[in-house]
Image (cartoon, rainbow, N blue to C red):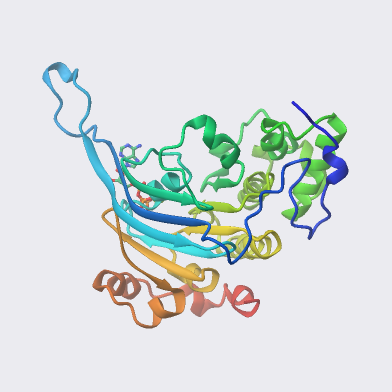
Amino acid sequence: MNAGPAMNALPAIGDATAIGDAPTTKVVPGATPLLRVRGLSVALPDFSAPRGLLGLSRAPLRPILQGVDMELSCGECLGLVGESGSGKTTLGRALLRLVAPTAGRIEFDGRDIAHETEAAMRPLRARMQMIFQDPLSSLNPRRTVGDAVVQPLRAYGRLGTRDEARRAAAMLLEQVALPAAFASRYPHELSGGQRQRVGIARAIALSPDLVVADEIVSGLDVSTQATILLLLRELRARLGLAIVFITHDLSVVRVLCDRIAVMREGRIVEQGTTADVFAAPRDHYTRELLDAVPLPDVERGWLDPLATAA
Ligand SMILES: Nc1ncnc2c1ncn2[C@@H]1O[C@H](COP(=O)(O)OP(=O)(O)OP(=O)(O)O)[C@@H](O)[C@H]1O
Ligand SMILES: [Mg+2]
């Protein structure tokens, strides 16, 4: 693999260019939407359904997503909400082609990727990343934090020498406000919030256009949640990231997201600007969802730093 001038091109903090010798494929803000989804459906095996004789036949498929339409502009943050089992994670995974669609189009930067081969997807995968709720499950316990954050660069052949790897790790840790010395630690030696920062550092290593963040602060205490959300918002502004932010927590959506999409039973039942949906929810299910959440955290003020930094 060509490591090229790699780390000579290391961006300074605050520079939104890609790390290493990656081709700069950043989409132009204001051009085609980054994502345009039409009629997206996903069906997955239903293992609870009665099977054929001796259970030898394949499990029947159950519709999980049905006819989803959505758009996301460059640098935009979309909050994806809905009750448990409504299909938020499945949609997030389908957008990144981690789940195969059964029907519909997923246009990423103007190109339909719904049925692209894995080989054709590979260069695109560098531009779309997922951050998971539990970074421990996505981090190899035997790999240091430094190895973990540069692993995407290595996978795409963008690292050469050990020195380049060390400098890239330090820079990525700095981007998420972790000391460079953390590079030699192991995941279990970090707090939950620090681990989530490592998850974020990995996700931004290839300078993606799109990040799907699935319940990434759900397991954290409220003050740590606020610091992670502030970091995400800062990175979004600095790197021009578009974010699909999946959450149960409507108080977070309110301060973090430009637009909101509400899911129910595999469909998007309402979408609009966050301000409009909160002020005048059109769908009765959205009203129920908003009524069910007293937004106590906003009242307690833990999100104040986010609200005032808006
Ligand atoms: N790999 C899978 N195989 C079969 N069915 C699945 C699979 N993953 C999810 N499902 C089903 O798809 C539906 C939607 O699940 P999904 O995880 O997308 O919901 P969610 O909105 O993210 O829920 P939560 O808020 O609890 O995370 C559920 O009924 C679930 O059982
Ligand atoms: Mg989920």
Q: Which residue is at 85% across, 29% downward?
A: 161
Q: Which residue is at 31% across, 40% downward?
A: 102
Query: Can you give x and y, in whole percent of width and height, for residue 135 in the image?
Result: 57, 43
Relative to residue 248, is residue 254 depicted above or below?
A: below
Q: Nearer the viewer, residue 99 or 32?
A: 32
Q: Quadrant of the C terminus?
A: bottom right
Q: Is residue 22 visible?
A: yes
Q: Quadrant of the N terminus?
A: top right
Q: Nearer the viewer, residue 84 or 256?
A: 256
Q: Nearer the viewer, residue 61 or 70?
A: 70
Number of labels in the image equals 0
As drawn, the residue found furthest toward the bottom would be: 279
Query: Can you give x and y, in whole percent of width and height, for residue 270 in the image?
Result: 33, 68
Q: State left or right for residue 217 relative to residue 153.
A: left
Query: Can you give x and y, in whole percent of width and height, for residue 28 in the image?
Result: 63, 60
Q: State left or right for residue 156 relative to residue 93.
A: right
Relative to residue 128, is residue 14 depicted above or below?
A: below
Q: Nearer the viewer, residue 296 or 125?
A: 125
Q: In what quadrant does ligand 1 lie? A: top left
Relative to residue 255, is residue 214 depicted above or below?
A: above
Relative to residue 124, is residue 144 depicted above or below?
A: above
Q: State left or right for residue 69 relative to residue 258.
A: left
Q: Is residue 186 visible?
A: no
Q: Which residue is at 80% across, 31% downward?
A: 3
